[in-house]
Every structure is written in structure tokens, then in C-alpha cells.
Image (tube, grey):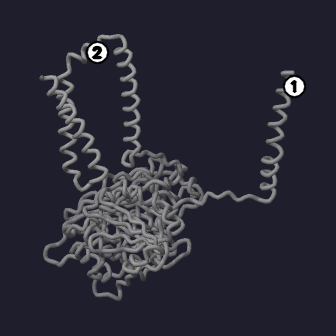
Amino acid sequence: MLQRIFGIIGWIGTALVFGAIAVRFFRPEWDQYAVYAAWAGLACVVLYTLGQWREIIAYFKGRNARYGAIAGVSVIVVVAILAIVNYLSQERFNKRWDLTANQQYSLSEQSVKLLRNLDAPVTFRVFDQNEALDRYRPRLAEYEYQSNQVSAEYIDMDQQPGQAKQANVDTYGTILIQYKDRTERVNSDAEQDLTNGLIKVITGTQSKVYFVQGHGEKDTADTERNGYSTINDALAKSNYAVEKLVLAQQKDVPADASVVIIGGLRSDLLSQETDMLRRYLQKGGHLLVLLDPPAPQGGPTPNVEGLLKEWSVDAGNNVVIDASGVGQIFGGDASVPVAATYGMHPITERFNLLTAYPLARSVAPTASATEGRVAQTIIETSARSWAETDLKASGEVALNPEAGDKPGPVSIGVVVTAPAATDTPAPTPAANTQGEQPPKPEARLAVVGDSDFAANFALGIQGNRDLFLNMVNWLAQQENLIAIRPKQADDRRITLTAESSRWIMLMSIFIIPAAVFATGVYTWWRRR
């Protein structure tokens, strides 16, 4: 009687399991009930199996049962291996190795950092022709893989013109990035453009960067070798509005200035201009000073250097010489010091790239802090460098501590932070990339003993561009954007002359096939 009851339970369990499978295929809206049925069926089958324990033990005592058990275990192992391989092959467990020089098929540190800090869904909507949509999928799949907040939609403009019209899109290859109630348009699937578009749509507002003019500073519109046009474009792509600022024509630094940059002045600031910057810093402003060594064509800069000393920064009257020879890698000489050592600071956190500074001066913290403003070194040259004080020396120079030369490592970059004055209205920092409230205003100053490291000719050097943008992001209190940015793919095409092309044709059509044929004939002759 008991065996009959167990048999009925077993059949009921089997029916429940098969019923749950049928519901999954034919009635997916009943999925919740299917789950309950599957668990109930499994319980019935287990109960039936336990009720047949005597028969199971008796069966496994026979020889055939042992052979069958071995075969069964083998099948289970094979099925388990296949299941594990299938599970690991799912998208979230994919692993690829990018062997390209610039890692152009992997997302940069900045993109990954930005995606993993998302606090709301982001949708990439791609509008193009059906046959062109597939080229966007690999790149956007990387964005989806890094964050479950990211999704992508692919819309054929020819088959779905209504959606294109509703989105006001009339150009093939347009990507709409949607975040909360904001939208940004991008017309490229390059990582740099996608990430910059993502930054713009998340921040929602533009921070304004002013470059001081009127004293021989670098020009952001200058496309020549020493100009700043390239860094101007990089700032624009990072959602900064860039403008020029002639302090002599102003009563005060504009209130909307997120960062003010002095890039390589040749003559000193006027005393009233220095007072403007002094007031700007006291009320929580952000200033970046790129100060070159004293030059014969320029003049002394006591006003600027005096302002820096008030903020515990000492600009040396020297030129940094680097005898390590590393500068030759970048086509320079001993007057191009190279830095590979950086202080512990948000600007240089996880920063492991070389930076080079054509014709730099030392910039170091003062011996004692001024009014509680403590300067911190973030950039140092190698131990085989020194600060040369003999600016009129020609030919070969050598370290001479007795003449005032300072042995390396030499500090060429410092930062200072101080609370904003409470009795003056402070400029309002922009919201960060997570849309949070702006951080508490505070004065921030960064000083580098060279302005050429951000010029057009030097931005191709490994870390120069990233370091400059990291400084601007830190000054603007946009620490979430500090990271290593996407790199442009190198042009690695091979240019062949007519003679080289002819030799390649002869090798592939005649010489290599002839060598293979001759080897075959020789092998046949030896065997004969």
C-alpha cells in the first residue's frame, strides 16, 4: 500500500515538472505559478526516490549497476563541464586581451570610472541604416559590460522613420545619449567622443576656464608649435567653456570662472591684476600658474612670484637640467627634464605615465607655511637632475652646489589648498559627474615650472595631456573626471615604394612557391 502511494507521488511530481516546462513555453505570463509547480514537482520526485531506497541499494550491488554508475558519472561530468563552459561564456564573464599599442579596443580608465559611478540609467540610441548598425555594437557592448545602468538601442532610420523624427534626428550615424531629462548628441562611435558626450550629459552644466592674456601668454587660438589650440580642444571636449581674460580690462575676475590659467607670461602682471587674483583666491577661486624660467627676452616677475610666496610656493631663479638622458627619448636634450615620480594627491593618483617639461624651472614649497597654507609637491624630476642657477652658461654645464645649484630630485610642480574666506561671496563650483550638490568652495592653487609641457608640440608626450587635464579637473573640483583618458589610435599603415611592392609580388608568386616546390623535389629524390 505504501509503495503504491509513493508511486502516485512520483507520477504527480513528474507531471508537475513537465507542466511547469510547458507553462514557460506557452504561457509565460503564468511564470510565477510555473516556479511553484517546478519546486513542488521536485519535492515529490525526491520523496518518491527516498521511498525506493531498498530497491536502489539492491540495484547498485550488481555488476551491471557498477558499470552503469561509472557511465552515468562520466555523462554527468561531461554535462557539468559543458554547463560550466556555457555559463562562463556568457557576456558578463567574457575576457579579452587587447594587444594594440594604445589599447584601442578597451575602455580607458576614465570611461570605466565614469560608468561604474553612474547613479541613474543611461541610454545610447543609435540612428543609422540597418547594415551599418553592427559597427556600433562592439563598442557600446563594452559600455554595457562596465555598468548595469547602461543600455543601448539600435534604430534603423529607414525602417523606423517615426522614431528618428520624434528624436529630431535627420543624419545617419547620430547617437543620442540620454540621462535623466538631458540629452547629448554624438556623431562618432570613438570612445573619446562617446565618453565626452557622457560627461556632458551627466554634468548638465559647463564649467568655464579663463586663460589670462596681455603679458605674452600662450594663445588658445594659436595652432603653431608653441600654441595652446590642442589643449583648448581637449578642454572643450571635456565639457569646459574656454575664454580669454585680459585682467587689465576688468574690475575683478569674472564670477563664473571655475579655473583661471596663466600660461607662460613673458612680462609681469600689473599690481592691480595681482590684487584681482589675490581676492579671487581668498574667496575660493582656482588658479593654475605655468611659469617658465627667466628668459633674456622677458623680464622679472616679482608680482607673480610674490603672490605665489603668499601661498607658500617658491619659484626658483634657475633652469632644471636632467642628465639621465631620458629626454632624448622624446627628441630633447638635458634641458628637457622628465618626471616619473609624483606625490600622493588626487591629481596624480594611479598616474604612472612619463611627463616631459621643455625648459623648466624649480617650483617648490617654501620653508615655512604662510597663513596656514601648506604647499605639496606633486611633480619631481629624476635624481640625476639639478637646478642650474647660472642662466648665462653656454655649452656643457655641471652640477655645482657651491654656486647655488640644487641637486635632484627637483620639485617642478606644487599644489595648495585653503578654506575660502567666510566674509566674501565664493564662486559656485559646478555639480560633479554624479549630479550631486556642488562641493564646499575652497581656494585651490596649482603651479608648474613650465608652460611648454601643455603646448601643441609637447602634448603628444605620454602623460602631458592627461596631467594638465587632471590639474584642471582638480582645480574645478571635478575629481570624478581625474583619470587616464582615451587615446587616439595610431596611424600604423605601411607605405610601400614601387620597388618594395614589386619584391613582395615576386616573393609571394614566384620565390616562396619555388622554394616549396624545390623542397618537395629534393625530398622525393632522397627517398628514391
Q: Is 302 left, or right, of 403 in this rendering?
A: left
Query: Which of the 4 quarters of the picture holds residue 482?
Result: bottom left
Q: Can residue 402 be seen in this view?
A: no
Residue 390, horizontal then vertical, whole percent? 49, 61
Rounded to the nearest angstrom, the CA distance separating label 1 from label 2 is 66 Å
Q: Is 525 left, or right, of 372 in this rendering?
A: right
Q: What residue type is labelled 1?
A: Trp
Q: What residue type is labelled 2?
A: Tyr
Query: Which of the 4 quarters of the picture holds residue 428?
Result: bottom left
- Quadrant where the C terminus sits is top right
Q: Which residue is drawn at 22% across and 53% down?
A: 30
The residue indicated by pointer 1 is 525
Sequence-wise, the earlier of marks 1 and 2 is: 2
Q: Is 318 left, or right, of 61 in this rendering?
A: right
Q: Is 366 left, or right, of 95 in this rendering?
A: left
Looking at the picture, tell me which residue is in the foreground, 263 or 299: 263
Q: Residues within 10 Å of mark 2 (few under 14, many from 20)?
A: few
Q: Is residue 493 visible?
A: yes
Looking at the picture, tell me which residue is in the foreground, 324 or 221: 221
Residue 393, horizontal then vertical, whole percent? 54, 61
Residue 263, horizontal then vertical, whole percent? 42, 72
- Circle 2: element type: helix
- Circle 1: element type: helix
- Quadrant where the N terminus sits is top left
Q: Residue 187 carries which label?
A: none
Q: In this view, does 476 lie above or below 345?
A: below
Q: Which residue is drawn at 22% across and 65% down?
A: 418
- Tally of numbered tags: 2
The residue indicated by pointer 2 is 59
Residue 374, horizontal then vertical, whole percent? 24, 60
